[in-house]
Amino acid sequence: MNIEQARFNMIEQQIRPWEVLDQSVLSLLSVVKREDFTPAAYRGMAFVDTEVPLPGGQCMLAPKVDARLLQELAVHKHERVLEVGAGSGYMAALLGHQAQHVTTMEIVPELARLAADNLRRAAVMNVDVVHASGSRGLVADAPFDVILLSGSVAEVPAAVLAQLKVGGRLAAIVGQQPIMRAVLFTRSGEQSYSSVDLFDTVAPRLKGFDEPTRFSF
């Protein structure tokens, strides 16, 4: 496989058509080597338009979903980011190239080790991996400019939203199968938030988050 041609095709045929047009994001996808964060057994799937299996029943999100979330969060160099769901460390590496500092939380021990190892090999120095559930965020390091839930949840916990700075953004995939959508929340004031639906998609559940016993709106 010609890796650079496969990377080019991923960007041009999957990601651009999904309304990812921010050149800084597209360039970053060429810089951060997705294949280096893909388990060896699935490396041939690194650039395919699908989720890639990870240990612990988790997965890497499809490339176009990662790219679109990254574009919508619009992270800046002075910002501090919290990611919940480190996975292989790929999204944390992308965020690390944009942000001042990233903390990524992972509840699955094997994945926390994998993400830390991959980030170290990729020489991403401004990302810390924390082995813990992210269902309540990380109060000790809050508030954050940006929070990303790298997987789906039935609803975003109020305790996590509360860890945003005013003006901060949180992206998550919210809902129940078969209907989920990526949503961008913005903290507009001390007690106020707004949200925008971004796109429909389906993603595996993040572990450790509560499932509601009834529908809530």
Image (cartoon, grey):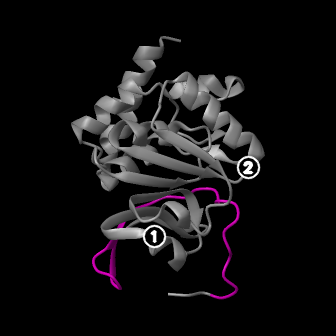
Specify the quadrant of the image occupied by residue 107.
Answer: bottom right
Q: Dot 2: within a 10 Å radius of its alpha carbon, few (fewer than 14), some, or many (20 or more) residues?
A: many
Q: Any magenta on residue 211?
A: yes
Front residue of 113/126: it is 126
Residue placed farthest to the front in the image? 140
Q: Is residue 135 left or right of residue 161?
A: right
Q: How far from the left and from the top, in percent, is residue 216?
A: 56, 87
Q: Residue 108 bears which disc, if any? A: 2
Front residue of 167/173: it is 167
Q: Residue 196 bears which disc, if any? A: none
Q: Residue at x 62, y 49 (%)?
A: 130
Can residue 192 be seen?
yes
Report if the CB atoms under discs 1 and 2 are less than 8 Å apart: no
Prevailing secondary structure of the magenta residues: loop
Q: How far from the left and from the top, in percent, is residue 30?
A: 37, 25
Q: Secondary structure at mark 2?
A: loop
Front residue of 200/190: it is 190
Q: Is residue 147 left or right of residue 44?
A: left
Q: Residue at x 33, y 65 (%)?
A: 168
Q: Which residues are magenta?
A: 185-214
Residue placed farthest to the top in the image? 2
Front residue of 38/105: it is 105
Give, as a three-letter code, the residue at label 1: Gln
Vertical placement of residue 56 versus 148, above or below? above
Q: How far from the left and from the top, in percent, is residue 165?
A: 35, 68
Specify the quadrant of the image occupied by residue 66.
Answer: top left
Q: CA distance from mark 1 to mark 2?
A: 23 Å
Please give the residue where the numbered disc 1 appears in the rendered image.
163
Give, as a three-letter code, the residue at label 2: Val
Q: Is residue 155 left or right of residue 13?
A: right
